[in-house]
Image (cartoon, rainbow, N blue to C red):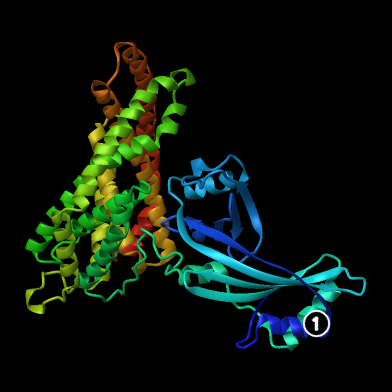
Amino acid sequence: MKFDLPDGLKFPQIVSRLSDNFTVRRERGSTEKYTFYDTADWRLYNHSLVLFGNGKRLCLRRLSVNEIIESSDISAQPVFVGDFPDGALKERLSDILEMRALLELFEMELRSKSIRILNIDEKTVTRVAYEEFHVDRETTTQLRLIPVRGYTKDYNNVRNYLDEIGLHKSKERDLFIWANKASGKTPGDYSSKLAIRLKPNMHTDDAMRVILRFLLGVMKKNEEGIKRDIDTEFLHDSRVAIRRTRSALSQIKNVFQREATQRFGADFSYLGKLSNRLRDLDVYLLNKKEYLGKIPSSLHRDMEPLFRYLQRERAKELRKVIAGLKSKRYERILMEWESFLNMGADESDRADNAALPIFATAKRRIYARYQSVVKSGKQITDDSEDQMLHSLRIECKKLRYLMEFFASLFPQRKIDFLIKQLKKMQDNLGRFQDLSVQEDYLVSVMDHLPLTSQRVRKTSLAIGCLIGVLHREKQEESKAFSRFFRQFSSTKNRELFRELFAN
C-alpha cells in the first residue's frame, strides 16, 4: 500500500513514532536509476503498459499495477523489436511496436530508505519504505507499506497506525504519469488519427480550418523524426497528413477562394512528391523478411545484392528529403499555410460554400463520393485492366478521408461500422496496388544492380522467383475483389449510407 506524506511530516519523524509502538530495525538506503521508454505515438501507453530499464535488464509492467509481467536481460538497449532477445518480452511487444522505434522518455532516480517491523521473536512482519523519485528538477515522495506472507494481522496493525498519525492511501494514479509531466511530456498526446470534434452548425470554412490545422500539426511533429531517421513511421504519418490535406482542398470545393486553393494544392503536391521514392524504398526494405519467406531458403543469399542496393538508394533519397525539409521553399509553404489557416474569414470575400453548415456539406460530399465508388466498382470485372482497380483505390481513399474528417458529426457506432466496411475493400485494393508496384520495380531493378558476372544469374533467378510469387498473389487479390465489393455494396451498407448521408 502506498501513502502520501502530509506536509511537514518527514520520514525520521515517522520512524520515531513507529519506534514508540513497534520494534524497528533500520536498513541501508539505496539509490537506483531507471530509464523509461515508449514509441513516438505512445503504443505501449495506449496498451496500458510501461517499459523501463534498470542496468542490463528491461521490465514491462501494467500501468497502475506495480507488478512486473515480463522482463529480459539485455546486452545493449534495443531500438526496434527485432533487437530484443528472443523470449516472452519480445513476443508480447512484437505486435504492439511493429516497425516503430523505442524512444527514451525520461530518466528517474529512486532514493529509498526502509525499516523492518519485528515481532517479539524478532521476525520481520512488515516493511516500511520511504521513496524519493527525481525526474529532471522535480521530486515526489511516497511511503510504501510492504507485507510479509503470513503476518497479515501485523501488517494491518501498522497500516492502522499510519492512518492514525495522518498518512492516507496515495491517490496518485501512477508515478509514470507524474514523471512524464515532470519531464514536460503528456502521455498519449500524439496520434496521426483524426481526433477532431466538429459542431454541425459550424461554417464549412471554419470546420475545414480546424481539420487542416490538425493535419499541419501532424506534419510539423514528424519533421524532426524524419530528419533524424528514427523510424519509417515519421515519414509515413507526415505523408498521410499531406495526402489528407490535398484531398480536403480538392474535395470540399468553393470553401476557400480559388486562387488560394490552387496555390496551396500545388504546394502540397510538391511536398508529397518530395518523398515518394523514399517511401517506396522504405516499404521494400520493411518487407525484406516477408520477401525472403516467399522464396526457397537456398536463394536467400542471392537476394542480398538487392537489399544492399536498396539500402544505398534509400540513404541517397533520405539526404534529398532532409535537404527538402530544410529548404526555404518548404519553410515558406508551411509558414504561409499556417498563416492562411489562422487568418479570420473576411465576410466580404468568402467563397460561395464557405458559410454553409458543415453538417450539410459533409453529408452531400460523402454521399456523392460513395455513389461514385459504387458506380466505379460495378464496372470492374475479372478481365478489367489493372488501372481500373488502381483508380477505384484512389476513389475509396478519398471517401475514407471524407468520412474520417467528419466522423464526429455522425453516430459513432454507425459511421465506424461503415469505415470498417470500406477499409476491408481498401485493404484488398491496397494489397493489389502494392503487389503491382513491387512487381514492376523488381522487373526493372536488375539493370541497376552492381553485380559481377558470376552473381548475375543467381540473383536474377532469386528475384525472378520472388516476382513469380508476387504476380500470383496479385492475381489472387484481383479475383478476391468481387467478394469484397459485394460486401461493401450490400443492401445493409447501402441503406446505412442513405440513412446517414442522403437525407
Nearest to the observer: residue 500 or residue 167: 167
Q: Amino acid at mark 1?
A: Ser
* 413 to 370, vertically: above or below: below
Q: Residue at x 14, y 60 (%)?
A: 332
Q: Residue at x 54, y 48 (%)?
A: 93
Q: Is residue 142 left or right of residue 433?
A: right
The answer to whether any part of residue 361 appears in the image is yes
Q: Is residue 243 left or right of residue 44?
A: left
Indicate the position of residue 117 as horizontal and vertical percent values: 81, 74
- Kindly identify which residue carries mark 1: 19
Counting the numbered discs, the total is: 1
Indicate the quadrant where residue 132 lies. Answer: bottom right
The answer to whether any part of residue 49 appears in the image is no
Q: Secondary structure at mark 1?
A: helix
Indicate the position of residue 370 as horizontal and vertical percent values: 28, 53
Indicate the position of residue 252 as horizontal and vertical percent values: 19, 61
